[in-house]
Amino acid sequence: MQIGLLGPLAVTDQSVPIAIPGEKLRAVIATLALTPGVTVSSFDLLDELWGERLPRSAANSLQGHIARLRRTLVQHSGKEEMRQVIRTSGPGYLLAVPPESIDASRFVADVERAGRMSAREPEKTIVLLTEALATWRGPALLDTGHGMICRTAAARLEETRLLARELLIDAKLALGGHYEVVSELEQLLSRHPLRERLCEQLMIALYRSGRQADALGTYHRLRQRLSAELGLEPGPGLQGTLAEILRHGADLLHEAS
């Protein structure tokens, strides 16, 4: 069985889609899929499904949702053994599937791997991250309700997605792709205007493209926004890049050979 969390919930068995009806059922399987093979307590599941509006029959309702979810997996797959995919475990339940069957787990592992190798193997990093980012089908955990576990996980996955794009841009810059990343960086920075790493990357790409004035303007716009909104100055990394641009530092023009 494969489970997709990077977009609307997608559950398949040997490429055959299994429709999971109802937001609460989707929330249950998504919450379990965030930590496959690890017990999620009934208390956490109850909180995820109902929060502070816990009905008197919530415990029985949760058991009913689990039973219905198991029936759905069996009916759509035609396999009685699919009932054991969702197992009762101590004070809660667990999803008995390997992490690699969850797209979110694979994505996080790929980004961690890319982070370890990006500086020395930019070509492989580009291939790895391009394929990983292509697995996204929309906002993470799009249709799994508004519980704290799924909302927190969605935010964490979106942050990892942004990190993946930054690592991909680093690899492209290392290979001399400064012209091609300018537009992408401008769009990303417009959506994340206080993201210093994006600002630094855009400054480098603009500088290498012969647009020093635009690179300096990018820095000053971020500095003004940081000061106005957070009362902060840019960090040392960004200030160091500014200094290199002002003194026409050769290091900023370095690309992988």
Image (tube, grey):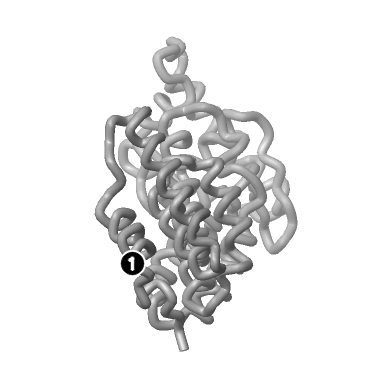
Q: Is residue 255 left or right of residue 68?
A: left
Q: Position of residue 149 (x, y in %)?
A: 42, 35
232 up-or-down from 13: above or below: above
Q: Amino acid at mark 1?
A: Arg
> What residue is rendered at 56% in x and 64% in y?
132
User: In this view, which residue lies farthest toward the bottom?
Assistant: 257
Q: Position of residue 154 (x, y in %)?
A: 49, 41
Q: Position of residue 205 (x, y in %)?
A: 51, 64
Q: Position of residue 218 (x, y in %)?
A: 47, 49
Out of 19 and 245, give the one closest to the viewer: 245
> What residue is rendered at 45% in x and 41% in y?
221
Residue 225 is at least partly visible in this image: yes
- For label 1, the crowd category at 10 Å Cα-Cα, with few meaning under 14, some 14 to 19 and many 20 or more, is few
When asked about the image quadrant of residue 191, the answer is: top right
Out of 27 and 215, give the one closest to the viewer: 215
SS for dot 1: loop
Residue tagged 1: 247
When asked about the image quadrant of residue 176, the answer is: bottom right
> What residue is rendered at 59% in x and 60% in y?
182
> What residue is rendered at 57% in x and 73% in y?
177
Residue 6 is at least partly visible in this image: no
Q: Is residue 222 left or right of residue 133?
A: left
Out of 75 and 195, give the one closest to the viewer: 195
Q: Is residue 141 left or right of residue 159?
A: right
Out of 252 and 169, give the one closest to the viewer: 252
Q: How many marks?
A: 1
99 up-or-down from 68: above or below: below
